[in-house]
Image (cartoon, rainbow, N blue to C red):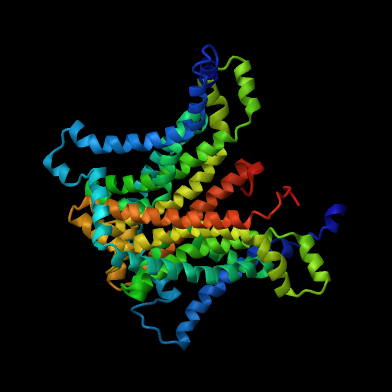
Amino acid sequence: MAELQADFATAGPADAAAPAARLWRRVEQTALGAGSIVLLLLLWQFLPDLVPMKAGTKLFFTVPSEIAGTLWQMFATGSIWAPLGVSAAAFAVGLGLAILAGLPLGILLGRSNTLNAMLDPIITAFNATPRLVFLPLLMLWFGLGLWSKVAIVFLGALFPLLINTYEGVRNADKLLINVVRSFGAGEWDIARLVVVPNALPFIIVGLRLAIGRAVLGVVVAEFFGAQDGLGVVMVRAASEFKVDVVFSGLIVFAALSLVMTGLVKLLEDRMSRWRPQRESGD
Amino acid sequence: MAREATVRPSPMWRYRNILLGGLAVVLFFAAWQAIFLFVPFNPLFISKPSLIFWGFVDLVQSGELLDDLTVSAVPFFLGLGAAVVVGVPLGIVMGWRVRVGYALDPLMTIFYASPLVALAPLLVIFFGVGLPGKTIIVFSLAVFPFIFNACAGVRAVDRRLIDVVRSLGGGEWALYRKVLLPSVLPYVVAAARIAIGRALIGVLVGEFFAASEGIGFAISRYGDLFAIDKMFACILTVMVIAVVLTEGIRFAERSAFPWRAGQ
């Protein structure tokens, strides 16, 4: 109702206001979205001036300008690269292994009913459980170095990849498979020619989920069982009340996750460009 | 009857998947147990199912397991409850009032995309390692699925229903109550499935950090003590709970909203 009235009000009486109203309508979404973020940052920045705080609370408090300064410092002095490199290595190795294991396994499960029925309960159990629960165990097995982190990242990223690949394979057009088969193709050719190309959009969605899980895995693993890495820097900073450093680390992790997800999105757009709009239903 | 006969009513076939799944689980544990006959693993690092079972029995009989689970369950449910109470209305308003959606969508996306667990050390410092700290960690992780799903649910509402309520003289409040909330419900239940996993992460993070009780604390303490059988018993308990919760919701979804099955 209110929307409707607002529209009448802007479009109605004065023609002179029309261009401005039209301009506003075009930028409204961006303006409101950015505006709320800016508003929140400003509120946060000036909160210490608005609300009287005890000295003890001030110790735990930081403002955006301080965080930005710290972040700038970390990059300017280069102190961020060493821990970031350690974290990135765990991320890359774990995610790579998850892709290497998840895609073939997902295709296999999608093509074999028996295997799928057998592994389904185990996969469901692992997927429902937060992988974090295995961290103490993995620390016992792999120590505090790279490999316990890799293991956690691997476990986190494996299941979205595996399950989405499986769904994609299941979604493959039976007719196409039968055509290829009747021209004498074996299981390998079916996978190469029909199943994998068909499953690609699903796999990419899985990859996007997996990236989020992998970043999460790195963060948590470094919080509890590591000696180097950005997560370790953050925990140390938190225990020394350097709140600005904690937030800087969070921003770096978030940026990493957003950039990687954005890249995958680009890949997705690039690869689905040729794909005709499919009718729903088989 | 005659038609059923043509579609192969073999019970073996119908229960085939369940049988195969059960068989695989049994095989898995049997292989785990059997491998110790051939490979002399260091019992400090890995346990076998029989020992884990006795460890589990031990934990149950001493009441430790139940105590730890109770301690962890309280922040889990409080945080999850708060996430529903805050997230669903916020999501509905974001989906229904277009401008509120414009304003909050990017902000929420940023929060959802960033690994918020990374703030756990700060939250622990702010609120302590007790109930408030854990509840807030759980809440901050679990609220976003509810917001986004409720929002998506509102945007998928049948326009005609809204028009009907309006033309029968229903106001804004009637719309919320009669149309929006019921149509959002399936989406909220789906969100709960996602949120449960995140809430479990929240509880575990809170307890790994510096708690003195709770199931997460038990796991890391038994790890430190090299009491691997008890550690495995706790881990398997968490796994069973996670599966029961998520599959229970999935089952509830299928029986309550069968038209949405598979989404």
- Give above or below for A6 relative to A220: above
- Give above or below for A78 relative to A22: below
Query: In the rendered view, does A14 fall on the left or right side of B54?
Result: right
Query: In the rendered view, does B133 fall on the left or right side of A279?
Result: left
Query: In the rendered view, does A189 fall on the left or right side of A25?
Result: right
- Give above or below for B200 relative to B29: above
Q: Is residue B232 visible?
A: no
Of B258 and A184, nearer the camera is A184
Residue found at x 64% / y 59%: A168
Of B58 and A166, nearer the camera is A166
Of A249 and B124, nearer the camera is A249
Residue found at x 33% / y 34%: A39
Of A101 and A194, nearer the camera is A194
Q: Which residue is at the far top?
A: A13
Q: Is residue B168 visible?
A: yes
Give residue B178's position: percent from left, percent from top: 56, 25
Give residue A78's position: percent from left, percent from top: 26, 63
State which quadrant residue B144 falls in: top left
Q: Which residue is at the far right?
A: B2
Q: Quadrant of the N terminus of chain A?
A: top right
Give residue A186's position: percent from left, percent from top: 75, 75
Residue found at x 56% / y 49%: B250
Give residue A128's position: percent from left, percent from top: 49, 57
Q: How many marks?
A: 0
